[in-house]
Each structure stands twice: as structure tokens, then as C-alpha cells.
């Protein structure tokens, strides 16, 4: 695990006063780039310590916030009234990171729900990132996963926004049983049910992102496992083909599950990410 040195954790203040907990992992030697990691729903940035350590060894400094209502950030657990709040929060963290590391190219790396935050934040940033990395984006749910969720979320998001119905399972997150056990025992992971408003907003934004794929013109790296039981690998590939970027790369990993940063092949995946970033510095 990457060691968190003194001073590597702090809070940013969001526009509405929400306190956003941020972890920082400095690169080994001089920094060549800055990567900002945005985690998925119910988890937190601390789960990316190993990913950060691998990037640090390649000369990449890493920042990673806990999104509002997650981990050590303040706010009602896993609650958001509108998805843009996540993106607005990320834009504040990006500004802080740029100020602290002037001159470094900035890359945004999102996993699962974090990919939607990255894509929504892009237009809000005063200076565009040098590239974006999307790991297992939730552009459509995997076949057979909560087939009733879309209708319930649409109704509940409007009329019963704080109703909590769905609890995410963890058995098919990773093929590594230890990763699953750690996830289940992690006190900073939210193990309860997700509000219908939050679920509805994720589904709404995922549909919007699919419709506007051609608007994605930044350098793009997309990572997807074929055995992902959470999101649709087919939808990810369709989004990639429709993306408007002239510099785009798709990496499909046969047999890998949803939690790509913690699959047994994580070293290979981290090398792929680091190589892609450094090739664009």
C-alpha cells in the first residue's frame, strides 16, 4: 500500500460549504504529470493507494478526493440532489491541484461513477486537462442487473428522492477474494442502500453522456473488463466508437470484473495508465 506522508491529507471547501477530503501522493523524484483520481459510488479515495503508488513510481503525482457524502467528506451519505454538484466539487479540487503543481499536465482518472463526474467536470474547467481515463464507465447497467431500477429510480428521484431501495452487491466486484473481503470490512465504504435521487441522477447522466459522446474531444483512454457484472461492456465499446476524440485508446481485458484497479492484473493496468499519461506529457 502507498504510505500517506504527513501533510498528504487535507480538506477543500465546496461552494455550498461541504468539506471535501483529499489525499495526495507525491511522485518519486521530479513530477512529470499530475493525475486526479475520482472514485466510484459508495467507496472512497483511500482504496486507490496502490494505484497511486504505481503512478508515483512512474513520476506521476496523484490527488484523490472523497466525493461529497463519501468516505471522510461531509454531507449526507451517498446523497446528491443534482449530479453537477459532484462535477463542481471536482473543479474546485482541480483548481487547488493546479495551483499547487504549476506547469504540470493534468490528467483526470475516473472509475465507475467517477468517470461520469470526470466527463461532466470537463466543460467547467478553466483549463482543459491533458487527457481523461475512464475505468469501467457506467454508461449502461450490465444485463440482468436490477432490471426494474430505471423505472423505480425515475419515479423515486422525483417523488421520493430520499427513499433508499438498492444496496450494491460486492461478490462480483473483483476476482480477488481478499479485495472483496476488504471492501466488505472497510468502515469508510458505505454499505447501506442508495437514495433513489442519487441513483436516478446517475442513470440520467449516463444517458446524457451516451447521447453526447461525440462531444468528448480530449485525449481519451477507456478501460473495460469483459466479465463486468455491474456495467455493460458493450455500452462502453459503443461509447468509445462514438467519442469525438482524435486521440483515443480502448483497452478491453478479457475475463476481468468491474473493479479494474484491484483485479489480479492491476499491475498491468497501472502500467498501461502510466505509459499512456507519460506519452502525452
Image (cartoon, rainbow, N blue to C red):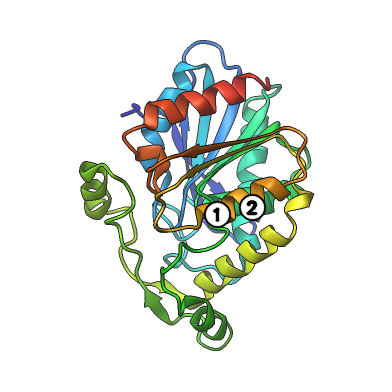
Write the residue at 25% across / 42% down. Answer: 176
Q: Dot 1, crowdedness within 10 Å: few (<14), some or many (≥20)? A: some
- Pick whichever, 208 or 35, lies toward us: 208
Determine whether, in the image, residue 14 is placed left or right of residue 168.
Answer: right
Q: Are marks 1 and 2 in contact (CB under 8 Å)?
A: yes
Write the residue at 77% across / 45% down. Answer: 244
Determine whether, in the image, residue 57 is placed left or right of residue 17.
Answer: left
For residue 86, which quarter of the picture? bottom right
Residue 275: x %, y % from top left: 55, 21
Residue 235: x %, y % from top left: 58, 56
Q: Is residue 89 visible?
A: no
Residue 2: x %, y % from top left: 35, 27
Query: Can you say whether 112 is above or below 169 in the image?
Result: above
Q: Is residue 240 visible?
A: yes
- Pick whichever, 195 or 71, lies toward us: 195
Write down the residue under mark 1: 234
Query: Can you say whether 143 is above or below 50 in the image?
Result: below
For residue 253, which quarter of the picture? top left
Q: Determine the CA span between mark 1 and mark 2.
A: 6 Å
Determine whether, in the image, residue 126 is placed left or right of residue 157.
Answer: right
Write the residue at 36% across / 32% down. Answer: 265
Query: Can you say whether 197 is above or below 30 in the image?
Result: below
Q: Secondary structure at mark 1?
A: helix
Write down the residue under mark 2: 238
Q: Secondary structure at mark 2?
A: helix
Amino acid at each position: 500500500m502507498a504510505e500517506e506522508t504527513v501533510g498528504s491529507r487535507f480538506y477543500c471547501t465546496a461552494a455550498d460549504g461541504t468539506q471535501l477530503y483529499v489525499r495526495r501522493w507525491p511522485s518519486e523524484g521530479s513530477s512529470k504529470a499530475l493525475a486526479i483520481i475520482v472514485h466510484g459510488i459508495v467507496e472512497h479515495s483511500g482504496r486507490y493507494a496502490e494505484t497511486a503508488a504505481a503512478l508515483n513510481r512512474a513520476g506521476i503525482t496523484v490527488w484523490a478526493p472523497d466525493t461529497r457524502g463519501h468516505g471522510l467528506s461531509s454531507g449526507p451519505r451517498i446523497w446528491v440532489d443534482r449530479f453537477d454538484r459532484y462535477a463542481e466539487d471536482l473543479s474546485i479540487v482541480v483548481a487547488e491541484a493546479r495551483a499547487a503543481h504549476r506547469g504540470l499536465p493534468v490528467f483526470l482518472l475516473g472509475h465507475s461513477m467517477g468517470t461520469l463526474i470526470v466527463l461532466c467536470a470537463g466543460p467547467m474547467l478553466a483549463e482543459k486537462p491533458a487527457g481523461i481515463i475512464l475505468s469501467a464507465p457506467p454508461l449502461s447497467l450490465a444485463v440482468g442487473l436490477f432490471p426494474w431500477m430505471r423505472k423505480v429510480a425515475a419515479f423515486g428521484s422525483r417523488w421520493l428522492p430520499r427513499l433508499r431501495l438498492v444496496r450494491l452487491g460486492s461478490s462480483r466486484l473483483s476476482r480477488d477474494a481478499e479485495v472483496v473481503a476488504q471492501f466488505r470490512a472497510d468502515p469508510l465504504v458505505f454499505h447501506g442502500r442508495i437514495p433513489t435521487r442519487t441513483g436516478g441522477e446517475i442513470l440520467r447522466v449516463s444517458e446524457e453522456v451516451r447521447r453526447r459522446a461525440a462531444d468528448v474531444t480530449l485525449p481519451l483512454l477507456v478501460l473495460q473488463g469483459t466479465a463486468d457484472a455491474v456495467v455493460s461492456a458493450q455500452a462502453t465499446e459503443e461509447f468509445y466508437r462514438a467519442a469525438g476524440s482524435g486521440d483515443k485508446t480502448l483497452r478491453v481485458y478479457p475475463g476481468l470484473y468491474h473493479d479494474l484497479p484491484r483485479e489480479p492484473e492491476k499491475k498491468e493496468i497501472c502500467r498501461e495508465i502510466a505509459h499512456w499519461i507519460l506519452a502525452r506529457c
